[in-house]
Image: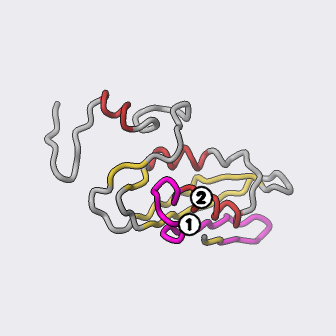
Amino acid sequence: MAVASSAYSTLVSDASRTEQFVALGHAGSDHYAGLETFENPGVTRVEMTSDELTSMCPVTGQPDLYVVTIEYAPRTRCLESKSLKLYLSRFRNEGVFCEALAVKIRDDVAEALELASDMVTVRLTQKPRGGIRIVATA
């Protein structure tokens, strides 16, 4: 069944999907090719939130669980969410402090979107461990 295309949506065939996006439409992380973007359809602000970010404490090796919020004002490109999910999942075995992780994510998103790093805000809220909650904003 064909769906009519409009200024707000685009009919995507299987052929064009595989040419435009590597991760979208494919199961698993075998198709991960980095943070993917698409043309901005006219939005002025984007906020993406995930509670599935996990990394490892670089000292103890224990898992650190996060809620991450990424905000940006797109110019020409927007961030594709499946590639972001796969990107975030790559930190699960990395030893990194919360503060450094916030900066890393901000810089990688800014680079993918071709924005200055001060145009992207990343807020990481580390779920409490040992009774301490950490919030880092970059």
Q: Which residue is mark 2?
A: 105
Q: Quadrant of residue 90?
A: top right
Decide whether residue 127 is among the magenta residues: yes
Image vertical order of residue 19 relative to residue 120, above or below: above
Residue 83 in percent (x, y) is at: 49, 45
Q: Residues at badges 1 and 2 in contact (C-beta under 8 Å)?
A: yes
Question: In the rendered structure, which amino acid carries the disc numbered 2?
Answer: Ile
Residue 25 in percent (x, y) is at: 40, 34
The alpha-carbon separation of the residues under discs 1 and 2 comes to: 7 Å
Left or right: residue 76 versus residue 108 is: left
Helix, strand or loop under label 1: strand
**Residue at 26% across / 36% down in the picture?**
12
Q: Residue furthest right?
A: 59
**Residue at 40% across / 38% down in the picture?**
21
Mark 2 surroundings within 10 Å by alpha-carbon count, few (fewer than 14), some (14 through 19), many (20 or more): many
Residue 38 in percent (x, y) is at: 36, 49
Q: Earlier in the sequence, mark 1 or mark 2?
A: 2
Magenta stretch in the rendered image: 109-135
Q: Which residue is mark 1?
A: 122
Depth check: give the residue in front, 52 or 80.
80
